[in-house]
Image (cartoon, helix red, strand yellow):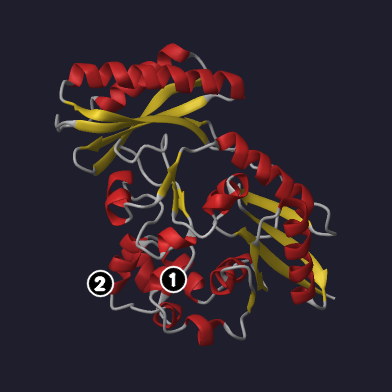
Amino acid sequence: MTRWVLHVDLDQFVAAVEVLRRPELRGRPVVVGGDGDPTKRGVVSTASYEARERGVHSGLPLRIAARKIPDAVFLAVDRDAYEAASDDVMATLRGFDAVVEVLGWDEAFLGVDTDDPEAVAREIQDRVLAATRLHCTVGIGDNKLRAKLATGFGKPAGVFRLTGDTWFEVLGDRPTDALWGIGSRTAKKLLAEGVRTVGELAAADPAELAARFGPATGPWLVRLGRGEDHSPVDDAPYVPRSRSRETTFQQDLDDWEEVGREVSVLARRVADDVADDGRAVARVVVKVRYAPFLTHTHGYALPAPTREPAPIGDAALAALALFAERRPVRLLGVRAEFEREDS
């Protein structure tokens, strides 16, 4: 038998959970975000397919979503409900003779030994649907990268296989940001180097990209273009690298003394989370989103790793002091990054 990687991705997961709780919403544009009030500041967490077809997507400000779809149903985020549904899905996946690597609420990799991965994929869909009434798409690949990308071609509720034999046929002419791991900024930088497509990235000289993107990133981008990925499916529990808190203000903060007080409040909340986690913090990062929507971050390394609230708060204020602009602020965030175990 052959070792295959299957990527299971729940279709419109959060919206689907909400529709299960409110069957009357089926077929309507549903937008989940913030406290469900689109007149307030906040962003879309997820949207149903009906809403996506009308231009609403994750990360879009709720007010813009309301302008695009005045008749949409807006709902508040309910983490407890989504986590409970996710737990049921992952328990179902662990019932297979497979290594299961959970990626988040709504997706996981499975390492499976089989001669018929499509049959396993369909059985996964049937079991998940029976256990949770949720639909999922399954991507099949000969590595994690290809399985992950295959899922996008199977949406919604389908099965799609992508391997080294079909990689360039499927992806060769597509822009580089079609790849998992390449965002719009990297794609623009690649375009500036004359690399437009996945096929061109695969044919690029690793040394030339190393000179532009760095000795590790440049060759990695070429491997990405070729669909190469040697990382195993790993069922070790996910351990977060940081803890963070953030808040969006309904009215811009013009007074930077008030900004400092709000950063201190967030830092105390993060310190409480850190105390529950039990690991030491090595660095604190502050995020500032200026009005209307420009975001910057600055970090501050602690003199020594700690779990104590006072040094974490001091580091947050030190990071805030690195912001040169004192413009009105609409969002603040504080992130505590844990000490690396190999440091």
Q: What element does badge 1 sit on?
A: helix
Residue 75: x and y in percent read 46, 41
Name the mark on residue 178: 1
**Residue 129 versus residue 196: which sits nearer the camera?**
129
- The answer to whether residue 244 is above or below residue 170 is above
One can see residue 172 in this view = yes
The amino acid type of the residue labelled 2 equals Ala
Residue 205 horizontal/vertical position (percent): 40, 78
Q: Are marks 1 and 2 in contact (CB under 8 Å)?
A: no
Q: Total label count?
A: 2
Amino acid on which disc 1 is placed: Ala
Direction from residue 278 to residue 176 in the image, left or right:
left
Residue 283 image point, x, y percent: 43, 29
Residue at the front extreme, as displayed? 24
Residue at 34% x, 61% y is 55
* Residue on which disc 2 sits: 192
Q: Is residue 235 visible?
A: no
Judged from this view, the residue extending furthest toward the top is 310
The residue closer to the viewer here, 105 or 78, is 78
Identified at 30% across, 27% down, the residue is 319
| Mark 2, secondary structure of its residue | helix
Instruction: Give how far across and how far down residue 77 sits, in percent.
Output: 49, 38
Residue at mark 1 to residue at mark 2: CA–CA distance: 17 Å
Would residue 63 appear left or right of 203 to someone viewing this image? left
In the image, is residue 339 above or below residue 130? above
Q: Residue 116: which numbered mark, if any? A: none
Q: Residues within 10 Å of mark 2 (few under 14, many from 20)?
A: few
- Whether 253 is drawn above or below 78: the answer is above
